[in-house]
Amino acid sequence: MSLRGVHEVLLAGEARAWALAELSRPDLTAVRHPLGFVCLPLEREGGEGVCLHLWTDSLAHAESTTSQIHCHSWDLVSHVLYGQVRNVHAVVDDACDHATHRVYEVVSGADGDRISPTSRTVRHTTGLVEVFGPGDTYTLAADRFHSSVVPEGGEAATIALGRGRPGSHDLSLGPLAGRSHHVSRQPLDAGERALAIRTITAHLT
């Protein structure tokens, strides 16, 4: 189903039924994402993609080499299936003196992420904090720094829709003295994938 089709499913209030049907696909895969969730990719065509994102302590997390504060090269629509998700906006200001972070560019490929430091150094403060629960849908434009936060010990899952915006880049805040490096995405094995599917299904039925 296209991104537009999935968006229509959300508008029709049929997200839970649609997600349950997608979870029954025999070709479903899952990877640990450096931002702390498990990603189950569902659709990708051109600059558009649809995924399920799962936050759970039942599965091991990937470790981030930068930070949780990032911005996308694509416009995001996120629908919360269950749990609570906080969309924490970051106010990022360029800084030469007293900078706390460097901006890194993240280029994703089939074999993982190439993360490269840029010349931009910054400071940041916490901006608007939005709190969303089951059935809520929110949007975030490309190029906006933020982090997605689930309460400690909490469980949550979302449907994430992304549409690429030409000229935008995936960026992350990281240490001032970091170097270029490559991070491989860690696929879940069959048992872990089955556990991820059972976890989401149990919350939706």
Image (cartoon, grey):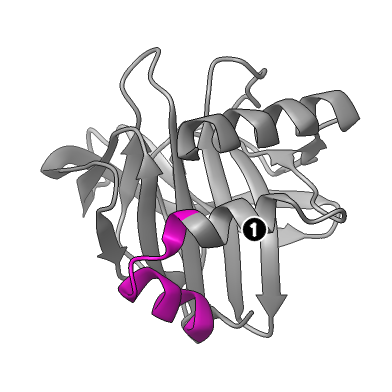
- Residue 146 painted magenta: no
Question: Relative to 162, is 111 on the left or the right?
Answer: right
Q: Position of residue 187 (x, y in %)?
A: 82, 37
| Residue 33, placed above or below residue 20 | above
Q: Name the residue under label 1.
A: 21
Please report the bounds of the magenta region as a residue range: 4-16
Residue at position x 29%, y 43% from top? 134
SS majority, magenta: helix
Q: 86 or 56, which lies in front? A: 56
Looking at the rendering, which quadrant does residue 110 occupy? bottom right
Question: Relative to 205, is 42 on the left or the right?
Answer: right
Residue at position x 31%, y 21% from top? 151
Q: Where is residue 11 in the image (x, y as percent from the top left)?
A: 32, 75
| Residue 1, placed above or below residue 191 | below
SS for dot 1: helix
Number of labels in the image equals 1
